[in-house]
Image (cartoon, rainbow, N blue to C red):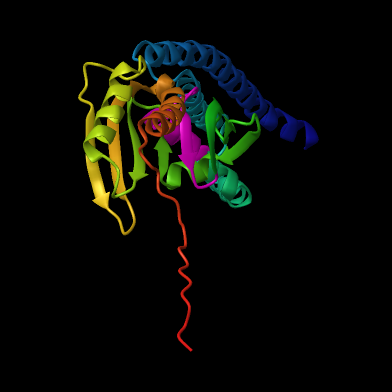
Amino acid sequence: MIDEHIEDLIPVFTEFLVNAVIALLILLIGWKALSVFRRWCIKSMDRIRVDHTVSVFLGSCINVVLFGLLIFAAADIVGISSASLVALLGSAGIAISLALQGSLSNFAGGVMILMLKPFATGDYIICESGEGTVANIGLIYTTLITVDNRQVVIPNGILSGSPLTNVTAQDRRRLIISVSIGYGANLKKAKEIMEKLFTDKPEILKDEPIDVYVDRLGTRSIVLTARGWTRTEDYWKAKWELTEAVKYAFDDAGIELPSHKLDVNVTDKPQ
């Protein structure tokens, strides 16, 4: 009886062995083909100027999906039920998603930043979590370097889901300087001085208009504003130097910059 059972099992074992070899060949050949296909996808995305980090990530995703289909095909040849594999992978996926919920949010934010490109490495950005020059954009975190050389690491989920300002996105910035002068000052002369300072400043672009105007009439002073355009990289240098030059020029011209003063008049009371 044992010999009969062994004889009955031999064809089954042989069939299983043949199917296992076929499944293994499918996995090996498929893996090689998928590697070639992944490299082709990455090169194609690089040619259309998709960020390299994103192209590598998308290539890996394609690779995982197609390799999963290969596993299903190999399992079906061996005789393993596809429904069982789907249930097992689904349960594992839910468990992993719950455990890595925060990281997956940051990961999705990183992919969106790299694809939509609201900022790039080298840009100066301002957001709720800080500001600085973008040093690195990863799939999970973005690293900023502040003006005093501190490193700020911000999760991409925050950056992709909140407003931010990209200071250096444009190649030009409008420089605006406002200064208060007293009501007794020579307004026409003050405007001429500010216009000349802006016109003579090399960093102020001459192909753009320079505007000098009275911004508002305050309680104790007149607010005078001058506007001009600079290259983004020259903005702060021009702003600081022009602000200082306005003070010196107004002092030389006798134009008073008002300050808060309290006048006290003392009179003798009649007896």
The image position of residue 131, as x and y in percent, is 53, 38
Residue 149 occupies quadrant: top right
Asked whether, in this view, residue 245 is left or right of residue 16, the answer is left
The image position of residue 203, as x and y in percent, is 36, 17
Residue 255 occupies quadrant: top left
Residue 196 occupies quadrant: top left
Instruction: Give the residue furthest to the front.
Output: 271
Asked whether, in this view, residue 153 is left or right of residue 205, the answer is right
In this view, the residue in front, 147 or 230, is 230
Quadrant occupied by the N terminus: top right
Q: Is residue 31 magenta?
A: no
Q: Is residue 120 magenta?
A: yes
In this view, the residue in front, 46 or 91, is 46
Task: Give me the residue at 30% from left, 43% from top.
Answer: 185
Residue 134 vs 102, above or below: the answer is above
Task: Give me the residue at 66% from left, 33% from top.
Answer: 150
Residue 2 vs 52, above or below: the answer is below
Number of disc labels: 0
Task: Give me the residue at 45% from left, 56% from top.
Answer: 260
Which region of the structure is painted magenta?
107-129
